[in-house]
Amino acid sequence: MAQQDYYELLGVEKGANDEELKKAYRKKAVQYHPDKNPGNKEAEEMFKKVSEAYEVLKDGEKRAAYDRYGHAAFKQAGGAGPRGPAGAGGGGFHDPFDIFRDVFNGGGGGGGIFDEMFGGGGGGRDSGRDGSDLRYDLEISLEEAAKGLEKEISFRKAVTCERCHGNGAEPGSKKVTCPTCKGHGQVRRSGGIITFTQTCPTCGGSGQKIEKACTACRGEGRTAQTTKLNVRIPAGVETGSRLRSSGNGEAGMAGGQAGDLYIVLTVREHELFERHGNDLFCEIPIKFTLATLGGALEVPTLFGKASLKIPAGTQSGTTFRLKGKGMPGLRGGAGDQLVRVQVEVPQSLTGEQRKILEEYVRVSGDADEPMAKSFFDKAKKFF
């Protein structure tokens, strides 16, 4: 069955820029993530597909190859089916479950699609390849962002095979000369009148091939494993903050270094507070008697209650500032909390309350010159 177009999967136009691609991917990934769709095989499959589409389109070289050749650009030499970033194959593990994967700065060898396009896949290599960096999306509350926390996360990644210790060979087996390149590490291909040389797809350029692949990892040198990790999140982080855990990405191959794990944070919207940088903003209703006569009011903050002084004659929409009650800064200091008050007008009055207010109207002179009339008299000069 024909594969669905990558742009169509992400819901973007062919000319979409990097930011549009990223935004579309995050939306689709959240929609189909297995954690939000437990037991839904169709959602799991769609999550794999959108992850595959994004990994191709976010990379300029891969995207150019896809735009020119379509899915055929990523088929293995020899006619095997497409091996996308969410599929299995000789380049590395790309299990999308529990974790959003993203290869930062190229990531080093994890069997990328562009490498496969030019014959970089295959087992039994001597040359070391660094493991891919991984991305884990973590959502936290605004309170957690304000105070910091430690959190245990769980994800799957490629780790060094315990049976072969990463060399891909069954214990006791040996390496032999690669039958494809005869030990040269390169093969010559003819494309009409042009002949070009490329890395041998069988041995990956080493000139040797494992006689018998490890039965545990099938010559990969790595196996997939669920890993748990305690992550310390400092106070003051915001949506888009990225934490790096060195060496906790995928294991390298043939002595290559392990990649890093990047935890990308999303801070949930709060029902009361809006965040603007390190400042917090909220609206608080107050009684018209407090606004008129003045007094003190207890207001909520992320760190408990605080007392706010309301001067007599406060107008609706007035904003007050609570110094240092906002979000802590990652480099020290703290923002402020801005409190805008909205004066509540009573919707019903008792007879006695109405009588008192009517007496106030009489004493203050409001009945003699209604405010609305006074305003329109002043506004006449503008018309």
Image (cartoon, rainbow, N blue to C red):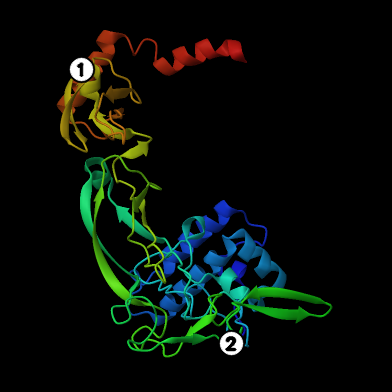
Tally of numbered tags: 2
- Locate residue 216 relative to residue 202 in the image: left or right: left
In the image, what residue occupies the spot 51% across and 11% down?
377
Kindly state the secondary structure of the residue where label 2 is placed: loop
- Locate residue 4 relative to residue 341 in the image: left or right: right
Work out whether mark 2 precedes mark 1 in sequence or the reverse, and give the earlier one: 2
- Locate residue 328 relative to residue 95 in the image: left or right: left
The x and y percentages for residue 109 are: 48, 67
Residue type of the residue flagged with mark 2: Ala
The x and y percentages for residue 174 are: 41, 87
The x and y percentages for residue 173 are: 38, 89
Residue 321's quadrant in the figure? top left
The x and y percentages for residue 200 are: 60, 78
Is residue 59 visible in the rendered image? The answer is yes
* Foreground residue among 164 and 267: 164
Q: Dot 1: within a 10 Å radius of its alpha carbon, few (fewer than 14), some, or many (20 or more) residues?
A: some
Question: Quarter holding the C terminus?
Answer: top right
Residue 28 in the image: above or below residue 321: below
Q: Which mark is residue 80?
A: 2
In the image, what residue occupies the spot 29% across and 52% down?
140
